[in-house]
Amino acid sequence: MTASIIGTSVRRKEDHRFITGQGRYTDDINRPGQAHAYFLRSPHAHAKIKSIDTAAAKAAKGVVGIFTGADIAADKLGPLTCGWMVTSKDGSPMKMGAHPVLAGDRVRYVGDHIAIVIAETHAQAKDAAELIAVDYEELPAVVDPAHAADAGAAQLHPEAPRNTIYQWELGNKPETEAAFKKAATKVSLNLTNNRLIPNAMEPRAAIGEYDDGTGGYTLYVTSQNPHVARLVISAFIGLAPEHKLRVVAPDVGGGFGSKIFIYAEEVVCTWAAKKVKRPVKWAAERSESFLSDAHGRDHITHAELALDADARILGLHVKTTANLGAYMSTFSSSVPTYLYGTLLSGQYNIPAIHVEVDAVYTNTAPVDAYRGAGRPEATFVIERIVEEAARQLKLDPVEFRRKNFVRTFPHQTPVIMAYDIGDYDASLDAAMKLANAKDFPARRAEAKARGKLRGLGYSTYIEACGLAPSAAVGSLGAGVGLWESAEVRVTPTGSVEVFTGAHSHGQGHETTFAQVVAGRLGIPLENVEIIHGDTNSVQFGMGTYGSRAAVGLTAVSRALDKIEAKAKKIAAHVLEASAADIVFENGEFKVAGTDRKLAFHEVALNAYVAHKFPTSEIEPGLKEGAFHDPTNFTFPAGCHICEVEIDPETGVTKVVNFTAVDDFGNVINPMVVEGQVHGGVAQGIGQALLEHGVYDKESGQLITGSYMDYTMPRADDLPTYKLGFTVTPCPSNPLGMKGCGEAGAIASPAAVINAVTDALGVKEFDMPATPQRVWATINRNRAAAE
Amino acid sequence: MPSVAMTVNGKAVSGEVETRTLLVHFLRENLRLTGTHVGCDTSQCGACVVHVNGKAVKSCTMLAVQAEGAQVTTVEGLTQDGKLHPVQAAFKEHHGLQCGFCTPGMIMTAVDMIRRIPDLDEKTIRAELEGNLCRCTGYQNIVKAIEAASKEMKGARA
């Protein structure tokens, strides 16, 4: 086994347990003596709670305990919090309303938690919840973010007048205004980025446990970042000291952002375990996921682009209203600001940018990061308006893009980011070739002869991954550092255990991380074990989101540097040579220029028996750790091209071709990377054509509350994608990786809607392009033409 | 509480259940066969697909008592003598899974699909997957895995 294993499509080590039904997800775990929890939730979008009567419910069969917000308050359990401070343009800090883990005297969205009912079985807990009598005084609900700040709108939180959390800006306003003054052409566009409901296939779940003997709590939870959960539950909520709380995130069935956040249920189950002196297990029903998982996106935007007479971009102005729902979720403030405004320059030279974002409260589920988090929204704005600019100027959208591409690196944008490397022409060329773009006019004519409408849409995207240099995010308001840790433990027999703070919930870390280790040390893949997801095993880590595995892998790589350095010293003593003469290649430590050598496992054994080196100089054992803080974001970029065919009689839009060419830098496992692109694009096409989280504008009831109403992409909604890759190795990490987890979801919605608007010949079209909306547009246009 | 008896993965099993207990809960809670998953509450997602008397069934749409006397196979029962079923092997070979949560239902659906339809092409597979949701893979590699397994099993029968 040599370094060549890095970059190959090794089949996944973790698959065996999943394909044989031996995965261990939170709901698969059963603790001795456990009781089952059900949460009573608000049926109203906005109401005062006048009283709660639990007497009848407490007397119901099987009930072990029922607790409400009053019990939480009595124990002084702190509220959930948002860990990223965003400052408004007037210098004032964001205005955060309290988010108790069980409601106090007010509920603010349908699904808000009111009480935990604990019983012998889940069915009994659910039955008993129906016996709780809550006296509500209904209040008017604020549902539409466009009107949340209106005078006279109902107020959600006393801390946030006019339901406004912050009014943030980034970029240079006077320069942008000047750009528009001298513009030869101005392009404007209204955009809606539809609310999405993440829908990882595994619903959230938690088991809380308290050990009276040790005074320690354990929480098994569906989390992408167990250490962050422990930190928040300990330091901010105050449930237990950090060292008395163990958080385990076992196999997790998808996250897409929605399992980053600290939720009420996991806190309350853990707290209640001590109250009832039994482990307390809760698993969400899908209906609860729809109501209470943090949703994604939900932006309303007006964008304007200024162009000179030669079609070069002079300036961009963007004004967005972001709906953050009824409470601020864990990282919600950062999504429509630093993960959004910073990416609005796209792949283009834009001398002046000014972006303004108003974040508002509404009586809807909290909104936070969902696959891509801010970057899909930014890409949708810039790629839609660039396409529209080309159309307005009657230019080829490809040529318009090329005219404005960034081609020299590093490139400092007006919105913080410094792009380190890229080749946007290369990915555009490759994508056009794969998509056979040059023959599109013939395909369009052929479709027209069949009475169908064809459209072609581009999205030349850039995003930022590998979040992120700690000092940089700290200066922008983050409450945490975004480094990652790794510990590499070599056993006496030469196998390796890697403890990583990154968490795998579908990404295949147990394979890709092992590839890096096996390749580097020249040992078989089977001899490497990746351990993650348990605060008792791994010291600390920030978890996985934003393609942070690139950060985690660099931490592993740095720990391996230290392992190699120590192993060389030990090998030198055993081989009776100078450490400077030891070379390590293909898993062997050799004395340069001789045939004297030791295999990796022989050095490992020597490290532990410690017979042949002075332990006064070299400590026995072989174990090293590293904390890696990235020096920059990484910038995956590429080109996605979507070709749609619309049936004007039914309004059905079919994606007939989808091409994605991505530059992720160097790739550890192409098979895994392709899988990430497939899934990301599916979510992006889902957003563009199918998915929409809809609340009733008056009552605030979630209309799309199940798979009967919320359209998930199914196999026959999607095409077989054509994928390609270009490579500019990332200069800011030793493996040259950029990250691949979000690109598909970031790039694709703009490509799809650019294709739909091309086919329909319209300027604006709100996602999702459902048959009903498409049909209505076609018929409106027909009627107008007649 | 009524008692129920059936054969699961070749073994005779029985248990006491509430009349409202769904087959999936009997499998997961009483038998601790947790390979079969619950992903929704409207019989849409297919994470709970098992075989009842040889046919693919969403075990969340069936009461445990309705399975009285039935032959039930779950994903745990597919592996024979330590050898993976060709569909299981194909899911691994073609990267037909990521988080693994929908996988047992996908595999059980695929085995049934291959049994019913001798010549599976991509279009048919996509249509047949109507009842199974996956959020990770975009389905591309699931389709590829089923197509490959179908071909392999056909070759083995010939």
Image: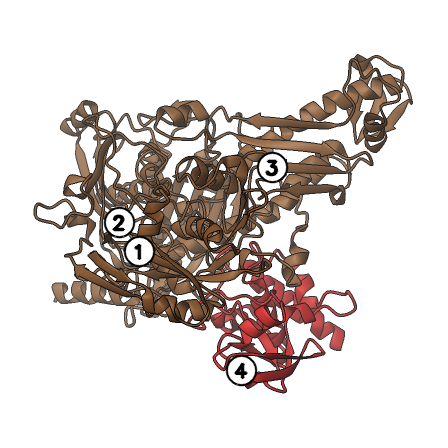
Chain colours: A brown, B red
- Give how far across and how far down residue A497 sits, in percent: 70, 38
Q: Are marks 3 and 1 on the same chain?
A: yes
Residue where numbered disc 1 is placed: A112
Q: Nearer the viewer, mark 4 or mark 2?
A: 4
| Between A5 and A148, the one nearer to me in the picture | A148
Local packing at callout 1 (Cα closer than 10 Å; few below 14, some 14-19, many 20+) is many
- Give how far across and how far down residue A558 sits, in percent: 63, 26
- Residue A538's disc number: 3
| Between A345 and A520, the one nearer to me in the picture | A520
The chain containing the residue under callout 2 comes to A
Q: Nearer the viewer, mark 1 or mark 4?
A: 4
- Residue A326's disc number: 2
Please identify the residue farthest to the bottom as the structure is shown. B69
**Quick check: A531 left or right of A543?**
right
Q: CA distance from mark 4 to mark 2?
A: 43 Å
**Residue A598 against residue B153 in the figure, above or below:** above
- Residue B1's disc number: 4
Q: Are marks 2 and 3 on the same chain?
A: yes
Give the structural element (helix, strand or loop) at label 1: loop
Give the structural element (helix, strand or loop) at label 3: loop
The chain containing the residue under callout 1 comes to A
Question: Label 1 amino acid?
Answer: Asp
Q: CA distance from mark 3 to mark 1?
A: 33 Å
Which of the 4 image quarters holds residue A621?
top right
